[in-house]
Amino acid sequence: MSVAESTCGTGPQPPGVPTAGALRLMVIDDEAVALRQMERMLRRRGYRVEGYADPREALARLEQSPADVVLTDLRMPQMSGMQLLRRIRARHPRTEVILITGYAAVNDAVEAVKAGAFYYIEKPVSPERLEAVIRRAAEKIALQDDNLRLREELARREPAREILGVSTAIRELVKVIHKVALIDCNVLIQGESGTGKELVARAIHAESQRKDKPFVGLNCGGFAEELVASELFGHERGSFTGADSRKPGLFEQARGGTVFLDEVGEMPLSAQVKLLRLIQERKIRRIGGQRPIALDFRLLSATNKNLEHEVEAGRFREDLFFRLKVVVIRVPPLRERRQDIPVLMNHFLEQYARLYRKPVQGFSAEARELLLGYAFPGNVRELEHIVCSAVALCETETIGLSDLPDDIRNLEVDTVSCNGLTTLEEVEKAHILRVLEGTNYSRRRAAEVLGIPRTTLWRKMRRYGIRDLR
Ligand SMILES: Nc1ncnc2c1ncn2[C@@H]1O[C@H](COP(=O)(O)OP(=O)(O)OP(=O)(O)O)[C@@H](O)[C@H]1O
Ligand SMILES: [Mg+2]
């Protein structure tokens, strides 16, 4: 907000804005008469006010007891209002500062706002105008507090989704999660895209002692370099171009909970240095801020890259890598645990049928076969998308081949066998199905294409449970 833009008006208050009596104000002016006048005027309006003639005393007081809004004179012998403003911004980020001066100058105003002043008012100031500005500052504080609280609540309320699967790999994974959830160590979750890394991170948090505290995550990829740092560590207003308000970083928002760094392999080297220091010191300094803030968090990170290679290539710091991987959890790709495919298919079918209010009950034998034989290079996320779009397209109670994406239907058998690491039987099944489809279920033509007698085809169809759809 700039001075020119700011409009003051009392209007209806958003919920949660403190009443005058609940606000703690501090007034600083070296002129005793002006100070007393201001104190009296604010008290009459119901505010709790502390007045100081010396800004240094005010700063000392703030160390012991915080204020919501500080109103300060600009020209004072001991310390200028601007200096005071900077000190308050650095050490008491929640406190809003309003500068009041008899010598208005546009330059001062601009400088004040850049340095993080909430507002800049010229003397003489009418009580109504001053009160309007104070209310606006209170609204801003309440809004920021509310935002933080809501985000925490949301993160807490979101139910942990179950990790489904019947394969040995998944059962092992769930066991490991139970174990590491109880220890407060850093965990690195490795796995291909869409395997369920975030789900694992949330499960660890949900089973840990920190479960009632926030789970906050950041995807470290796709951010401009300085933005990653500001997201993680927070910044003070005006600390860089575009930093138009103060922002607590991810580690501060976690407040005793879990920080999840997704795609940690994408983190720029400059942020890696800072992250390493933060992990070691458990303290943070916001960008543009001076005061170190003590932190309490548990760190989980995930990557689909091979971080060892990244270290070798000089793109990832080795010391940080060792810090992150106190425990490493590998989430296996879906093709290594094909037994989980039916469970997940049914789960997503039910989930999306409910969501889209459609009476879809199941898969046709052909659609099921095709999916069971598919390689799922995009892992569980791809399976979820396929089922989701099939439910959306499906016009009957059963998902058929025509509801599945074209590229899967037209897949060559060898793609399935290479990527899918499937058995010969599965490949045979999938291939027969495809040829039958291609010949419109003419058994004679299919047998010709396959180069086997019709009776053999019929036997195989029976064995694989392929229905005749002619
Ligand atoms: N075992 C599982 N049981 C149930 N749902 C799962 C399972 N694994 C993954 N999912 C679901 O699949 C989707 C993708 O999972 P998630 O986002 O955790 O994967 P990821 O490894 O973080 O993917 P990416 O690398 O693309 O970020 C989510 O909707 C998740 O709930
Ligand atoms: Mg993810």
Image (tube, helix red, strand yellow):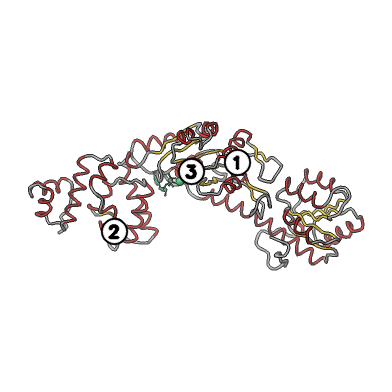
- At 82% from the left edge and 65% from the top edge, which residue is drawn? 127
Question: Local crowd at mark 2 within 10 Å, few (<14), some, or many (≥20)?
Answer: many
Label 3, on which residue? 263
Can you say whether 169 is above or below 54 in the image? above
Specify the quadrant of the image occupied by residue 258: top right
Contact, CB < 8 Å: mark 1 with mark 3?
no
Q: Is mark 3 within 8 Å of ligand 1?
A: yes
Q: Is 193 left or right of 406, judged from the image as shown?
A: right
Question: Local crowd at mark 3 within 10 Å, few (<14), some, or many (≥20)?
Answer: many
The kind of residue tagged 1 is Gly
Quarter holding the N terminus is bottom right
Q: Position of residue 401 (x, y in %)?
A: 25, 56
- C-alpha distance separating marks 2 and 3: 33 Å
Q: Is 410 left or right of 459, judged from the image as shown?
A: right
User: Most extreme residue toward the front, as rendered?
Assistant: 313
Label 2, on which residue? 403
The kind of residue tagged 3 is Glu
Q: Position of residue 27 (x, y in %)?
A: 83, 54
Q: Position of residue 235 (x, y in %)?
A: 65, 48
- At 73% from the left edge and 45% from the top edge, which residue is drawn? 91
- At 73% from the left edge and 66% from the top edge, which residue is drawn? 8
Label 1, on which residue? 256
